[in-house]
Image (cartoon, rainbow, N blue to C red):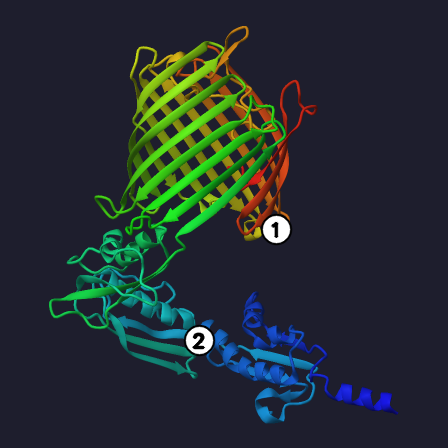
Amino acid sequence: MKHSLFAAVFVAFLPFGAHAAKVTVTTPNAPEGFNEKLRSASLSLSTAERDDATAQDLLAAAQSDYARLIGVLYAEGYFGGVITIRVDGKEAASIPPLRAPGEVRRIDITVDRRAEFTFGTAHVTPLHPRIVLPEGFATGKPARGDLIGEAARSGVDGWRAKGHAKAAVTDQSITADHARKTLDADITLAPGPRLRFGALIVQETGRPSRVRPSRIRAIAGLPTGKAFSPDTLNQSATRLRRSGAFRSVVMTEAETPNPDGTLDITTRVVDAKRRRIGVGAELSSLEGLTLTGFWLHRNLLGGAERLRFDGMIGGIGGNSGGEDYRLGVRYDRPATFSPDTSLFLQASIEESNEPDYRERSVEIGGGLSHIFSKYLTAEAGLSYRYSEIDDDLGSRSLQHLLFPLRATWDRRRASALNPKSGQYVDLTLTPFLGLESQSGSGARLFADARTYHSIGEADRFTFAARAQLGSVAGAEVTDVPADMLFYSGGADTVRGQAYQSLGVELSPGVTVGGRAFMAFSGELRADVTNTIQAVTFADTGYVAQDALGTGKGEWHSGAGFGARYMTGVGPIRVDIATPLDSGAGKDFELYIGIGQAF
């Protein structure tokens, strides 16, 4: 008897609606895709999928769906539609909220679109002469409700783009004529006066920023006294964000213009963490393990400066000539000379133990970097380099002054670690001046161009191609640092071929880097699931003795397949490749790293 009473009490306290409700959405004679829009907007569907949804939750969701689904009808131009929502056979709107049933088994939603309305009148006045309203916002076109808001925003944005910062909608008349099946939309704008940028006010929120207000203004570069422009305002916010000193940047316009026709802007910033540490690893069956790490200090001197130390140990356990070491430090100061120009100072010490040479070097220098646009950046610098080299030609020390010039054009879309479309071009020209008789003078040119194109549903298939070109002119191979010459083979050039296995054999037993280089790579990437990607690829490379690709020169190639596992920090890459020559299908190389190969 006690057990029976316990069971009865237990059942009584079970949550109502424990059984999942079935939800149907019916749209008679609807065009393709319309039903899916309704299903996406329906709260009943998403609520029914919850394991903890009660009958009260389901009734509330069904009753709220009237407004949600009407919104879909209006957005698509149906202003005379009829919506019926039945909860276990009863119209949801007729069920009192406080008398919800103890259980909901099914919800049936029927949406009858009725006739589609068209625009009778479609006016936005006054308009700036250069502003074009959305193409569908015109007499006789389907009266989609979302076009009305889009037209109003276009009108306001058009005036703001021309300096009228306080342009706004002052009146709107939206009338549906059910007899004629038309919708009349009349929107009235008030452009307001043409304004100029006023002061940039740095507002403290909570803990004050460690970056000095004067430096915040310098980095933002708000052009006080110039005509107001939303794009210019966004650019100032972007400058503050890309400085790396702030976790959050908000810029707002003053409610009221100043008497002199200027409009003050207020910025609120939240500092990013002052210090950051990062590590990375890459593994190759021949090159061994490469470990990298960095330590970053933001806002070093109160002006949003950055100090970064980078370290690298490579070739661990590999068969690529020995272990390589590098330690570098770089200081960056944004907004030097102009808001888009940064000053940098850097120094490095490095030892490279490669198959055909050993080089130890020290380099110190600095320069300026400038952001020309969203896609184009460039930098110019001056540095001193001292190198000690041991190779098949003997031992020597070199001293050079380097004048590196670099430009980067980056229109890749999606993540730089996993681009889906766009282009990337990195061009470096480094004139160099020898400071002693053994050190030659000349110039080194290197270009890296990549393109990406995706097809299929959700960009499932991605074609990626890469071309690398290099040349060293004006100096002999003995007159320049060994790592300024070119080799081919390995993860960054030709996979499947041994690391830096292709150079120039001047004579039997004497191999050096070439003064001309070409490499081409192609990949087909296919998304298998949301986290798994399959890849097939082919690479080829060429190294020649002379700067123009003449003299002694050879090609080699490789191909293979791989997989990518997508993570929050980028894809984890695993590639297996074989050479396309005498070792094809016999020799294999394994590569593991983070990010796509290119």
Residue at 56%, 65% in the rendered image: 33
Residue 435, image x, y percentages: 29, 17
Residue at 67%, 23% in the rendered image: 584
**Distance of mark 1 from mark 2, alpha carbons?**
44 Å
Q: Is residue 367 above or below residue 181?
A: above
Label 1: few (<14), some (14–19) or many (≥20) C-alpha neighbours in 10 Å: few
Instruction: Locate the N terminus and report the quarter of the image it occupies.
Output: bottom right
Question: What residue would you read off at disc 2?
Answer: 117
Q: Is residue 96 visible?
A: no
Residue 191, image x, y percentages: 21, 70
**Sooner in the amino-acid sequence: mark 1 or mark 2:** 2
Tell me the mark number nearer the camera, choosing from 1 and 2: 1
In the picture, measured across the screen, residue 29 lies left or right of residue 22, that is left
Residue at 23%, 56% in the rendered image: 217
Residue at 67%, 90% in the rendered image: 101
In the picture, measured across the screen, residue 115 lies left or right of residue 477, that is right
Q: Is residue 390 visible?
A: yes
Q: Nearer the viewer, residue 437 or 464?
A: 437
